Image (spheres, grey):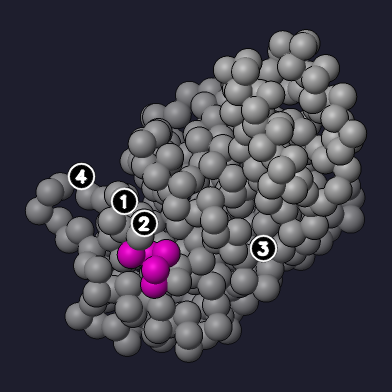
Amino acid sequence: MILPKASRLTPEQLNEVTAIVTEFGCSIQPIIGAVRSIYAILGDERDELMINRLEGLDYIERIDRIQSPFKLMDRRSDLSTHRIRVGRSILGEELVVIAGQCTIDPKNPNYFYETAAAVKEAGATSLRGGVWKPRTNPYSFQGDAKSLDILMEASRRTGLPVDAEVMDEDQVKLALDAGVHMLQVGARNALNYSLLRTIGKAVSQRPDRSVLLKRSLHMGPIAEFVSAAEYIVAFGNPNVILCPRGTAPTLDGYRNHPDESITPLLKEKTWAPVIVDPSHSVGKASYVPACALAAVAYGADGLCIESHVSPSHGIGDDPKQAVTPEVLAGIIRQARALWALRRGMA
């Protein structure tokens, strides 16, 4: 990883650096920051001659070599001080809460508008809403692109940034063109490396956009989760957030096996912020408050909670796992108190 002396390389300097690393079978990926840019060497960076030639350039401050499967996501990388802003919130400086419906009902948009206003009142900092939905049963409701207009209208009414799951290249483009602030990669696609690359390319020139990467249902080692994020960041936009959401095998009584406890393990390996989804972890509204507080106790930077003004009228998972805005307000109040207490102990 290359750090220039100035805030960024000039085009001529970048061409010279690129020419050097290309000789050794490597390439350069600029990571453009608001204050300073770094330049990742993609490939085998162990060749001493290549490093010596780079260090000999008078405009290079230093070269950091990280021997890790995920060079950019590693907590020792020069992205370790990177902060992600979602709307007015900066992850790590306050507890971020994403809340809203599992699935937007295009036939009843007012439910979503009412939910959006209510979760904002409850203290949420971002709004979630399912436009397209992956379903095990091919005959179940798969979502509707029309819901994208509803989502963005709710964003305009509340002033909250929005999060929406995408599953293919067309959806990625539609979401970004509409103004979606955070693209969500769901559990079923968390190891879909083709989609991860597509998203990485799509947001590479959009430093104002971020990606919420959920943990796969069948993910094994923590490194596998972090490496999936590397696929996105490698294209130049480091705004990736890791989201544990329960995994397999299921635990009797819960929808999945709650995995908020991996938060400290993630933070040992990577600088990336962690937002936990308790709704999908436990799959039952009455269990969500305890799981949310457990996530904060483990060090989560935020929560992603399903909420609906009238869960019984929701579609998708809302009837069984969405909390009401009143319950959400209580979760947020307690979670922020716990977050502040934990931060004071750090």
Q: Using the image, determine if residue 281 lies above or below residue 268.
A: below
Of labels 1 and 3, earlier in sequence is 3
Mark 4 / mark 2, whichever is N-terminal: 4
Residue 217 visible in the shown view: no
**Residue at coordinates 59% horizontally, 45% vertically from top-left?**
236
Closer to the chain start, of discs 2 and 3, is 3
Q: CA distance from mark 1 to mark 2?
A: 5 Å
Q: Is residue 323 magenta?
A: no
Q: CA distance from mark 1 to mark 4?
A: 20 Å
What's the residue type where badge 2 is placed? Val
Q: Earlier in the sequence, mark 3 or mark 4?
A: 3
Q: Nearer the viewer, mark 1 or mark 4?
A: 1
Q: CA distance from mark 2 to mark 3?
A: 20 Å
Image mark count: 4
Q: Which mark is residue 85?
A: 3
Q: Residues within 10 Å of mark 2 (few under 14, many from 20)?
A: many
